[in-house]
Amino acid sequence: MARERSERRGKSEGRGMRRRGMGRRKVCRFCADKTMLIDYKDTRVLGNFLSERGKIIPGRITGNCSGHQRRLTVAIKQARTVALLPYTSVYP
Amino acid sequence: MADRRYETLVLIHPDQGEPGSKELATRIRTLIEEQGGTVSQVQEWGLRDLSYPVGKQKRGFYVLFEYRASTKGLAEIQRTLKLTDPVLRYVSVRQAENAPPAPPRPAKRSEREDEDFDGAAEFEGMGEGEA
């Protein structure tokens, strides 16, 4: 879904949407790969969206769509309560 | 009252040991059933390293329960878990009716193979705010 849209936008770039700088357009990984599910138990997937300090990386940087980013943050916070993921990498 | 599908992951104190955690798991299972729930799956993940110390422990046993229960039943299950001392933490999540059952327990950190999913390093313009 998201991929089709980005291709279309690629052709008619410049209409309203100015892309500053260079680099690949970011696509929400969960939209691109439907088999990738957001699950609080799956620390392998969730860990990709944490910074080295254990902070949640904002959607504007990862390119996640708002809906998936919202569900992702909820899942990360659930995983944190049972110590599957860290709140911080620096021990308090 | 309509039953709902839930999933609860329980973190058990490592001093319980393997047999103690198994026994506690069966106790929690009967607890769920006493509250009118039907357990569809119990997964024991075994002793795992925690991401941060809980109750001065660095490791703990994880047990996952998948079941159906009423909202009142869930409230009672959670209340009892809170009162159970060897339970360090737990998290209950409502599952969608059509969600597939949880796949067998995720690979342990040691047996984890690297995926072709390269992580945060790829994100451009990522800056760490504080030092």
Image (tube, coloured by chain):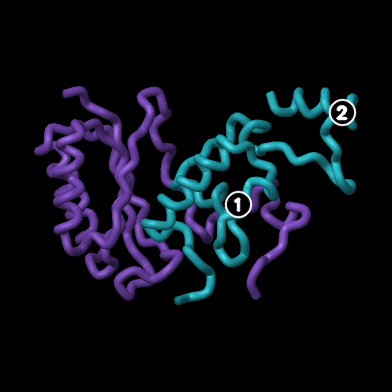
> Is residue A48 in view?
no
- Would you identify the image quadrant in which residue A12 lies? top right
Report how many numbered discs are placed on residues in the image. 2
Viewer-closest of A25 and A38: A25
Q: With B85 as the anchor, is B91 left or right in this view?
A: right
Viewer-closest of A54 and B87: A54
Q: Secondary structure at mark 2?
A: loop
User: Furthest-left residue in view?
Assistant: B34
Q: Residue B45's spot in the image, x, y percent?
A: 37, 52
Which color was chain A given? cyan
- Would you identify the image quadrant in which residue B41 lies? top left
Q: Residue B23's spot in the image, x, y percent?
A: 17, 54
Give the residue at x 20% y 48%: B78
Q: Residue A52's spot in the image, x, y percent?
A: 62, 65
User: Furthest-front residue in view?
Assistant: A16
Distance, label 1 to label 2, CA atoms, is 31 Å
Image height of B55 relative to A21, above or below: below
Q: What residue did someone put label 2 on? A: A15
Q: Which amino acid lies under the numbered mark 1 shown in the image of this protein?
A: Phe
Q: What residue did someone put label 1 on? A: A49
Give the residue at x 82% y 23%: A8
For label 2, count other residues whose C-alpha is less than 10 Å away and answer few (under 14), some (14-19) or many (20+): few
Give the residue at x 64% y 71%: B130
**Chain coloured purple:** B
